[in-house]
Image: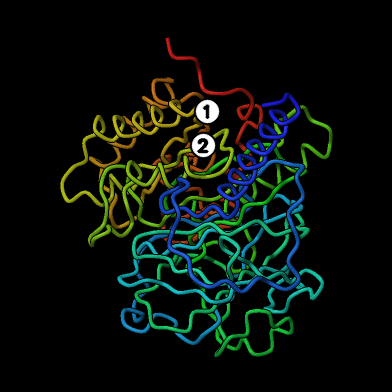
Amino acid sequence: MTRRRGYALLAAIVSVIVALSAALYVGVATDDGTNDRASLSGSRLPRNSAAPVSTGVWVGSWSASPVGAEPGTEIEGLAGRSVRNVVHTGVGGTSARITLSNLYGQSPLTITHASIAVAAGSGTAAASAASMRRLTFGGATTVVVPPGQQVLSDAVAVRIPADSDVLVTTYSPTPAGPVTYHPTARQTSYVAEGDLTEDVTGTPYTGQVEYWRYLTALDVLSDEAVGTVVAFGDSLTDGKNSSLNANNRWPDYLSDRLRAALAAGRDLPRYSVVNAGIGGNQVLVSGLGRPSENEAGLTRFARDVLGRPNVKVVVVDLGVNDILRNRGLADPDRILAGLRDLVRQAHARGIKVVGATLMPFGGHRGHTEAREDVRQAINAAIRAGTVYDAVVDFDKAVRDPYDPRALRPDYDSGDDLHPSDRGYERMASVFDLDDLKGGAPAEL
């Protein structure tokens, strides 16, 4: 073989390897936060598609953890209807991708059409026409998500602004129930009859619901952020009793604070903030069902934190429900052991953990002096620095100075457990933004 022919053969081999690598890279789908492929069908390519830009870092701009199966959708699911989820972004980017979940479905979920667009304004199902994009999955417009799994869309080039509403719409023509959902959205989303996935007027979307359905994440290829902060907790993080459509959960306020501080020139990490709160969530105990509804923090941590893109910091505010929902008296040592297990999981991935003290619930129907003692024991360990890398003292921030076992009246939404909008804002205001600096401590 001549040297020229040898070079030509080598070049051909390299070309084949590059082509195969590209084919393997395109269209990643996941079932548990990894890159396993969910089953796909359909081959129609999207119109108005565009290749994503290559600069920037993938970060979470919005998220909501799957909670359970939506009542009343067991047989038909949402067949023949367009589901338009409204979500609020933390940071912006030049490309976007979404995660759809069929975790609680008992049959395959077929999505034949999905789209993303920037909302025309707040409180509307109307879209900015220029931003409407059709989504694909492995290059196909149709995707089949098996029961118990999730799927990641292809990236699509679209400018997603920070602090804005985005519409993610899906259409399924066939029965597939029950619907995987997140019930405490504090956000109005929409539904319409028929395939109106790319409708920009919003007029046919006459159905309204305060749930997020199927959709669990919106990631952006960001030129504004280089990492993700995940707020991991229960209803106090989920924003229960905060004002509807106002984005007044404490992670929303924290996102606003960080963005404003960066704009003012503070030396802080450029991170996004996403919410992984679930109402009623416990560190140790999952709900009923198979798969378990309201999965315990210990077991959902891999999916809802470690499975998010470029996570640098997790803020853990969990443990109150382990006290309140225990029929007997919760063991503080077991709860603390569970919290330390979360920290170990995070450290194994190089993620820093900021932990919150447990907030007061005096006056709530579940409050007893014995349960108060458990809360105080857990908070003492957290403040002593034996649990987390850094501490945010939510308890101190919102408690009533005249009755430290209860929320301060103006920080109480009225149920002696969940904060008001002012209370959520106060929680974010005491978070030391410098705690976002640095990574997990080195293991000795």
Q: Residue at x 30, y 70 (%)?
A: 106
State the residue lying farthest toward the front: 1
Number of other residues with Cα within 10 Å of mark 1, as a class: few under 14, some 14 to 19, many 20 or more: many
- Name above or below for residue 410 compared with residue 434: below
Q: Which residue is mark 2?
A: 314
Q: Residue at x 53, y 58 (%)?
A: 99
In the image shown, does 119 or 54 lie closer to the viewer? 54
User: Disc 2 and disc 1: Cα gap in Å?
Assistant: 6 Å
Q: At which x and y percent is residue 312?
A: 57, 33
Disc 2 and disc 1 in contact, CB within 8 angstroms: yes
Q: Earlier in the sequence, mark 2 or mark 1?
A: 2
Amino acid type of disc 2? Val
Q: Which residue is mark 1?
A: 352
State the residue lying farthest toward the left: 328
Number of other residues with Cα within 10 Å of mark 2, as a class: few under 14, some 14 to 19, many 20 or more: many
Amino acid type of disc 1? Lys
In the image shown, does 321 or 397 lie closer to the viewer? 321
Q: At which x and y percent is residue 145?
A: 42, 66
Q: Secondary structure at mark 2?
A: strand
Residue 223, by quadrant, is top right
